[in-house]
Structure formats: C-alpha cells, structure tokens
Image (cartoon, rainbow, N blue to C red):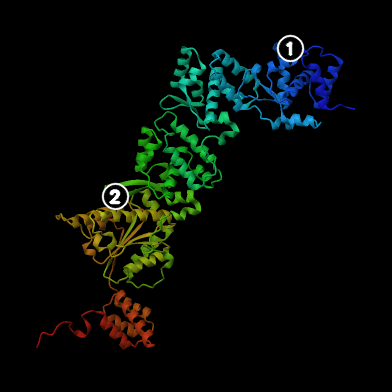
C-alpha cells in the first residue's frame, strides 16, 4: 500500500538531516525521495531533497535561506549552491515562496513552504500546481522595480554590482513585458536601471512620484565624472530616456518624472489604476477636469513638449470616459486635441454661467507665438472652432468699457450637452418674438402699384428665392442683407404687411421695442442697440429660416442725425444711428423698418434700404373693398358711400368695425347703416358735424 506524502517526507528528513548530502544513493533515502516525487509530482530528486528540508523547517514556523539549508544538512553552503535551480523550480511551481521580496541576492533570500501545500500534505491530498501558483503572489514588474531600487539605495552595493544585479534580474525575467519592451527602446543597461528606479518612485508615491535628479544619480554612481555626465545628458535632453519620451524633467531641472508614454510602458494594463482617476465622469465633471488640468501647474505652456503632453492628457481623459456619447462626435469634427480642450473649457464655462477671456485662455494653453496667432484668428473670426460654428466672439460691456468674450454657439451646446442643451440656449423673450405660426391670416387691400411692390418683397422672402438671391449677391461682392423700409401715414397696413409676409414665408419676427432701446443712462443705449443685433445673429443661427428683425415705428432712431449740437442726448442718438448704419452695412439677414415720417429719414439710411415702399391712404375703390370685407352686412352702395364720405385709413376702418362688433354684442343686433355712419362721424376727433370743442366765452 502506497505510503502518505507526509510519511515519505518524514523518512527523507530523518536520513537527510545532518547527512552532509552524502549517501544519497542509499536504498532507504532513494525510496523516500522517489515516494515524494510520486505523491507530490516533483520532477527530480534535487527538488525532493530541498523540499524535505524546507518542509521540515516550515512546519517549525521557520523560513530558510541557503545558509539555513546548509546547516540543516550539516554541509557547506557551497554544497547547497548546486540545488539553487531546484529552489527556483519549486518556487515557480508555487510549492515554496520567497518571504522577502526586497532581497535580490540568492544567498540571502528566505523561503518557506506555502500554507496551501502544507495543508494538502497534512490531509494526504496531492497539491494542485495551478492553485499553488495563483494563491501565492507572483513576482511581477513592481517587485522587479522594488528589487532594483533596494540595490540603488544600498550603500554597500557598488555601481558595478548594481548593474550586474540588474542584468541578472532582467535575464531571469526576460519574458516580463516591462523588461522585453524596455530593452527594445533603451539598449543601455544603466539607463534602464534609472528607469526601473523611477518606476518604483512612481508607484511608492501613488502614481504621482517624482525622482530627485541629484539624489538618484548619487545613489547610482560613485564616480563624480559619470554622475555629472548623466546629469548633463538629462538637462540637455540627449539622454535616451528623454529622447524616447519615457521621462521628463521638471521646469527647474531638479526632479524627473515618467511621461505618459513612460507610464504606459511601465504599467501596461494597469495604466488607468495609477495617478488621478479620470473614469466615471459625467458631462459636467469631464469638462471641469479638462479645465482644471489646463489651468494647473502641470501644464506649463512655455515648457518644451507641453503641447504634446497636453494632447496626451486630453486623449487619456477622453479614453477613460468613452461612455460619454458626445465624445466620438466631437473627435470626428475636431481632430486637434488642443482645440478639443478649448471646446471642453468653453463647455465648462457654459455650464457654470461663466465667460472666457480670449487672451487669458490662449495664454493658459499656448506659448507666446501660438497664443498671438490664435487670438488674431478669433478676432478675425477665422479660427476653426468659429468656422465650425461651435464657438463665437460675443461683445460685452461693463463700467470699465466694452470687451469681447468667447462662448459656445447653440450648435456647440447641442453637440456637447445633447438633451441638456435647452438649459443653456437663450430664447428671445416672448414679447420680442412673434412666431410665424401664431400669426393669423388677414386680407389686405392696396392700390395696384403698392400691391406690385409688396408682391415683389413677398416673393423675395420665399426661402428658395431668398437663398438664391443671397448667394448671387455674395458672388458679386455685394451686401447680402435685405433691408426694407415701409413708410407712410398711420394705419395704412405697414405693420400688418410684415406680419403677413412672415406668416406666408414661415419666418419668425424679432420685434424691437424702440422705447426700450433708449436709456436714461449715458452710454447704455448704444449697448442696448448692439445687443439687439447680437441677439438677432444668434437667433439667425438657431433658426431654420432667417427671422425678420422689425423696427416698428422707427421714426426716432432713423431720423436725420444732429449736427452742430454737443448735447449728450444728441451725441447718444447719433451714436445709436452710427451703430445701426454699421450693422446694416454687414447685415446677414432681413431688417424691416416702418415709419410714419419718411421725410425726416436720414440719407445714409435711405441708401442702405434695398426696398422702399410708400403706403398711401387707400383709394375709394380699396376702401370700398375694405368696408365690404370687414362688414359683410353692408351693401355695395353703402360701402361705396362710406368710402367717398370718410377719408379713413385701413386702421381707422378697423376701429369702426371693432365698435360695431361691440355694439352687436351688447344690443344683440347688427348695427344699421345710420348707426355705422354715426360711428364714422365720431372717429375723427374735432371734425364731427362741424361742432367745435372748447369753452364758450360769451356771458
């Protein structure tokens, strides 16, 4: 019957202890060793001999180095050295474990049988090699770097001995990815040794480690000449580790740290586990993270290689947050990492209600030469982010004067924030925005000449015609804006014509409150006028069809400019008109102004209006049609009679119609012709039946 493993071990230990490693060919020893090999699946008698000694001492709770094993056998340590391969083989199988990973010299390394293997033997079970291996810590790249560091910092280890050890350690771990990959990039053993030392510093300081240049080189090299030579190569950038972009020096040249490439080579699959964690960010924390990095000391725009490092950092943070749906779309549109960084910073500002200073942001991101280049591009509106309609320059004002800021366009907000974009897109106030869909159809009556001009404008505002017209004007280098002036007596249909054009063409109307554009505070009116055009441009970008900018009853701001008067009011009004003239010159949209006082229109404005349409009071024929359209109860003769007798505008006729409807509601019957005549008589103030309104001076 086969003996148990523990029995073979006991028999072997009794013969081997103090046996001076002699008489190994004896029958009893051979049987015990062969039994261990069968029951434990050991590969050689050497493994069985070493395992018996280590098992015996491990059961007593002791770890053993080669000297301890030699004492166990009663032999010289040199006799035990030939069993080192057996020690390594047992360690690889997971049967024994080195208890002190920081010791690199084989003669001083301590070993014990693993608890798992001891347990299996005591329970007469065969150890599972796979389990034995995975249950004990595997020697890895971190252990290797720690071993190298322990030698670097050991004052008793000479430079030659240090490099000898590193060479041996690399040979023993030739298949380790770190060793294999580093050798391909860095052929010099001393340079690789420096890299291993820096890797250990990196890990020991939780992924933010820096290695001091002076102290590290002092630990590695005893010879001053070599130490200074290596230091010089680090400072002037000729060192292979710097050339290969694996390490970099701080701006003051005192410290070294791993670059992103260096971290990737060292950490491999563990790359995301060290340093600052970027995973799990949402839209808002992601943009804030980018901003904090660009504005931190880690990004020094004037430092050599800063832009490359910035690009790497942006890619790392993006890669760590691939779940954000907007990132692939953004990367497809914006190839450059620095431009994406600027876009993300603008997104953070948008989310927090902040604005971006062009000069400050360019200064944070770029060295001086590039900074001035991009500032110029933004001012000239040729920057790529502007051409993509993702960012825009917006004028601002304060008590210190006017300035411009960078901010996201509506397109940029939609691209980044998605469904949340509506939270940040400004919408015109309801009182200022008239939606085309809300305008009711209304029949208007004009003379043949007026109708012809109005039809031309209406046709021009149809989107197909408008787009074609703008394109052709642009090709010929002509202003592409469409400015239209409607002038004439009150109530003649100017405003209503604009409403019907908007309804028919699907264009919304941005209505300018003239009274609100004039402020009692000096300088405020100009800012308000500028903001009107700024908001109009924004609305043009967010609208499918160009909206109409309507200056209704604009007599006050389109009147002739004042000359020879230095009053602050006149200066303000002239400044307002100059702003409007400049905006009309570069208009990209549709501006319509209505006025009752065309004779007072400034000549500079007159030149800038493409269409100028005069609205006269309706003719007798037109008024007859209006009466019949508004009051269907009137006969043709009655309507014609009212048209002849009363010189009403369309607006005044509307007043009669409204009062007629009020009377019908109150009295429950349609007013008679005589009652309508009475209402007409009352419409004209001071003209009814020849009566005067005033005081009787006779006593």
Residue 61 lies, with reference to residue 655, above or below; the image says above
Quick one: which residue is furthest to the front in this view? Answer: 60
Spot occupied by residue 456 in the image (x, y as percentages of width and height): 36, 63
At a point 43% along the width and 34% down the height, the residue shown is 299
Name the side, left or right, on which 347 lies relative to 590. Answer: right
Spot occupied by residue 61 in the image (x, y as percentages of width and height): 70, 26
Q: Is residue 514 visible?
A: no
Per the image, the residue denoted by label 1 is: 75
Q: Using the rendered view, name the quadrant where residue 567 is placed.
A: bottom left
Quick one: quadrant of the C terminus? bottom left
Quick one: quadrant of the N terminus? top right
Front disc: 2 or 1? 1
The one nearer the camera, 247 or 602, is 247
At a point 73% along the width and 32% down the height, the residue shown is 131
Name the side, left or right, on which 672 lies relative to 17. Answer: left
Spot occupied by residue 227 in the image (x, y as percentages of width and height): 47, 15
Spot occupied by residue 237 in the image (x, y as percentages of width and height): 45, 22
Q: Is residue 355 visible?
A: yes
Are there few (<14), some (14-19), or many (20+) residues within 10 Å of tag 2? Answer: few
The one nearer the camera, 269 or 132, is 132
At a point 19% along the width and 54% down the height, the residue shown is 571
Q: Earlier in the sequence, mark 2 or mark 1?
A: 1
**Which element carries disc 2, helix, strand or loop?**
strand
């Amino acid at each position: 019957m086969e003996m148990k493993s523990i029995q073979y071990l006991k028999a072997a230990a009794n013969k081997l202890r103090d046996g001076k490693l002699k008489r190994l060919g004896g029958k009893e020893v051979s049987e015990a060793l062969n039994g261990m090999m069968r029951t434990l699946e050991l590969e050689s008698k050497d493994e069985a001999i070493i395992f018996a000694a280590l098992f015996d001492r491990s059961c007593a709770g002791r770890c053993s180095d080669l000297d301890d094993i030699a004492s166990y056998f009663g032999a010289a340590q040199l006799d035990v050295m030939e069993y080192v391969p057996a020690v390594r083989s047992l360690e690889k199988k997971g049967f024994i474990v080195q208890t002190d990973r920081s010791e690199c010299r084989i003669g001083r390394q301590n070993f014990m049988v693993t608890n798992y293997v001891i347990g299996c033997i005591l329970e007469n079970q065969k150890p599972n090699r796979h389990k034995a291996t995975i249950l004990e810590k595997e020697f890895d790249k971190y252990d290797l770097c720690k071993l190298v560091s322990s030698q670097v910092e050991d004052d008793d280890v000479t430079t030659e001995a240090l490099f000898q050890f590193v060479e041996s350690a690399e040979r023993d771990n030739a298949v380790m990815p770190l060793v294999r990959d580093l050798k391909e990039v860095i052929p010099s053993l001393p340079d690789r040794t420096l890299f291993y030392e820096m890797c250990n510093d990196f890990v020991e300081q939780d992924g933010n480690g820096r290695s001091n240049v002076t102290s590290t080189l002092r630990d590695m090299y005893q010879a001053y000449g070599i130490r200074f030579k290596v230091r010089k190569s680090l400072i002037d950038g000729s060192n292979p580790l710097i050339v290969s972009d694996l390490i970099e020096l701080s701006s003051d040249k005192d410290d070294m740290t791993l670059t992103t490439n260096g971290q990737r080579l060292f950490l491999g699959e563990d790359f995301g586990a060290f340093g600052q964690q970027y995973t799990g960010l949402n839209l808002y924390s992601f943009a804030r993270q980018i901003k904090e990095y660009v504005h931190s000391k880690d990004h020094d725009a004037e430092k050599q290689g800063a832009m490359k490092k910035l690009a790497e950092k942006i890619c790392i943070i993006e890669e760590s947050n691939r779940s954000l749906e907007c990132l692939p779309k953004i990367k497809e549109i914006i190839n450059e990492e620095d431009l994406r960084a600027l876009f993300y910073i603008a997104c953070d500002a948008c989310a927090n209600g902040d604005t971006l200073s062009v000069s400050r942001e360019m200064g944070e991101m770029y060295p001086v030469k590039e900074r001035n280049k991009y500032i110029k591009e933004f001012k000239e509106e040729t920057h790529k982010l502007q051409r993509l309609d993702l960012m825009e320059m917006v004028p601002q004002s304060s008590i210190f004067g006017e300035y411009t800021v960078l901010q996201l366009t509506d397109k940029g907000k939609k691209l980044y924030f998605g469904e949340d974009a509506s939270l940040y897109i400004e919408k015109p106030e309801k009182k200022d925005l008239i939606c085309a869909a809300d305008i009711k159809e209304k029949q208007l009556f004009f003379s043949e000449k007026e109708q012809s001009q109005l039809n031309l404008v209406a046709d021009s505002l149809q989107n197909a015609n408008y787009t074609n017209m703008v394109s052709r004007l642009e090709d010929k280098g002509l202003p592409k804006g469409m400015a239209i002036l409607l002038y004439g007596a009150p109530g003649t249909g100017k405003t209503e014509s604009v409403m019907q054009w908007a309804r028919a063409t699907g264009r919304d109307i941005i209505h300018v409150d003239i009274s609100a554009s004039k402020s009692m505070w000096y300088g405020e009116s100009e800012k308000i006028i500028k903001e009107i055009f700024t908001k109009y441009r924004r609305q043009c970008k967010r609208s499918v069809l160009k909206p109409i900018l309507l200056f209704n009853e604009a007599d006050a701001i389109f009147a002739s400019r004042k000359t020879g008067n230095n009053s602050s009011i006149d200066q303000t009004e002239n400044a307002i008109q100059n702003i409007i003239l400049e905006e009309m010159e570069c208009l990209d949209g549709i501006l319509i102004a209505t006025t009752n006082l065309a004779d007072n229109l400034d000549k500079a404005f007159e030149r800038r209006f493409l269409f100028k349409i005069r609205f006269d009071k309706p003719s007798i024929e037109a008024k007859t049609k209006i009466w019949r359209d508004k009051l269907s109860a009137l006969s043709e003769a009655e309507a014609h009679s009212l048209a002849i007798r009363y010189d009403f505008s369309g607006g005044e006729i509307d007043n009669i119609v409204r009062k007629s409807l009020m009377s019908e509601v109150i009295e429950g019957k349609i007013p008679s012709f005589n009652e309508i005549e009475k209402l007409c008589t009352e419409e004209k103030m001071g003209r009814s039946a020849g009566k005067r309104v005033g005081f009787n001076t006779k006593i």
